[in-house]
Amino acid sequence: MPVTRTETRADVGRYVDDALRDRYFTACDAVYAMGAPIRAELDVETSFGTTHVYRYGPTDPAAESRTPIVLVHGAGSCSAMWYPNTAALSADRPVYALDTPGDPGRSIQREPIHQPERAAQWLDEALAALDLDRVHLIGSSYGGWLTLNQAHRRPGRLASVTLLDPGGLEKVGLRFFVWIFASLIATSAPKALRPRLAAWLEQQVITVSELRTMIRFAVRAYRIRRPAPLPLTEDELRTIRTPLHLLLGRRSLLVHPQRQLERVPRLIPGARAEVISNTGHGPQIDHAELTNGRMLAFIDSVD
């Protein structure tokens, strides 16, 4: 698919050049191929640019009318990161995965969306353009901040929200950025060392060649131009009334899991919070079957 390069500006993400972009897209497609078959790809227009969307399932045509799931990926990635989840999530209801503008996907960013109100406006406009009036929104990491921010600012289309080791609950600390940097270096480690590094870093993607290639090309091909989002205040969290499910890795370096396990249900009425053992920042990848089951059980309980 042709991609129009956005004018260079300080607050809009961009690809370094077309050749690297195309090699990155090829790497992404290899990861998509490991997930459920993509039923359709759509481009929808918003005030902030063109949002690229992947449509999955359901396998049973009678389930088309069920409330759909919408997936919002983490920073520095694209919708391909959902490959361990798309088959299970789309078996009994439609699923849409959005490439967030400002990250290395097939969306085309023209205006910044890192400010909380603009982020909520972008997501609301994207859902409206897809004719989705009611959705179960699932976000991971930075996508978790986008999801939490939506529940606070523009909850009208939300049937529920699920947050997978999300941003938005605590200020991002140095330990998380050190882990990201170490994980990136580990993708270039000799093959014999990768399993040990993956276990030490709680980063199983190091051992998946398709993911490793995609991550390395993302860093080379794309320049993200936004600051780390600020966490929501306790007063902002108290405004949320959308059914909320929080899933954290026990060894997360983005948040302090035990702190948030107590804090989130105290601040958000009816919120459900769980910790997944033996994982860090990526429970939906490290323990896909378990995480898929818990997400679907929560969504079914809301429906």
Image (tube, rainbow, N blue to C red):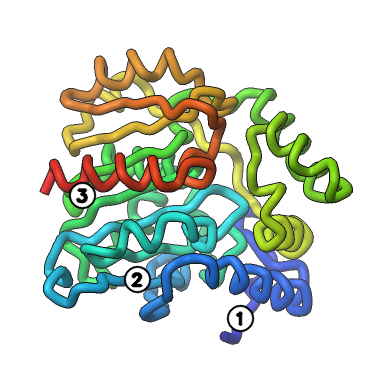
Q: CA distance from mark 3 to mark 1?
A: 32 Å
Q: Say which element carries label 1.
A: loop
Other-residue count near label 3 (Cα within 10 Å), few / some / many at <14 / 14–19 / ≥20: many
Mark 1 — residue?
4
> Which callout, 2 or 1, points at the residue further toward the start of the chain?
1
Q: Which residue is mark 2?
A: 56
Judge from the rendering whether residue 237 lies leftward or rightward of residue 284; answer left or right.
left
From the image, state whether disc 3 or disc 2 is nearer to you: 2
Quadrant of the snapshot with the N terminus: bottom right
Where on the picture, by quarter, is residue 183?
A: top right
What residue is drawn where x is 65% and y is 48%?
Answer: 205
Q: Badge 3 is on which residue?
A: 158
Q: Position of residue 10 (x, y in %)?
A: 67, 55
Residue 252 vs 162, above or below: the answer is: above
Could you say where residue 164 lies in the image, as x and y percent from the top left? 42, 39
Vertical position of residue 43 compared to residue 98: above or below: below
Give the amino acid at mark 3: Leu
- Looking at the image, residue 231 sits to the left or right of residue 206; the answer is left
How many residues crowd mark 1 within 10 Å: few (<14), some (14–19), many (20+)? Answer: few
User: Residue 230 in the image: x percent, y percent?
Assistant: 49, 31
Give the residue type at disc 2.
Tyr
First in residue order: circle 3 vs circle 2: 2
Mark 3 or mark 1, earlier in chain: 1
Residue 191 seen in this snapshot: yes
Residue found at x 59% / y 73%: 29
Give the quadrant of residue 246: top left
User: Which mark lies nearer to you, 2 or 1?
Assistant: 2
Circle nearer the viewer, 3 or 1: 3
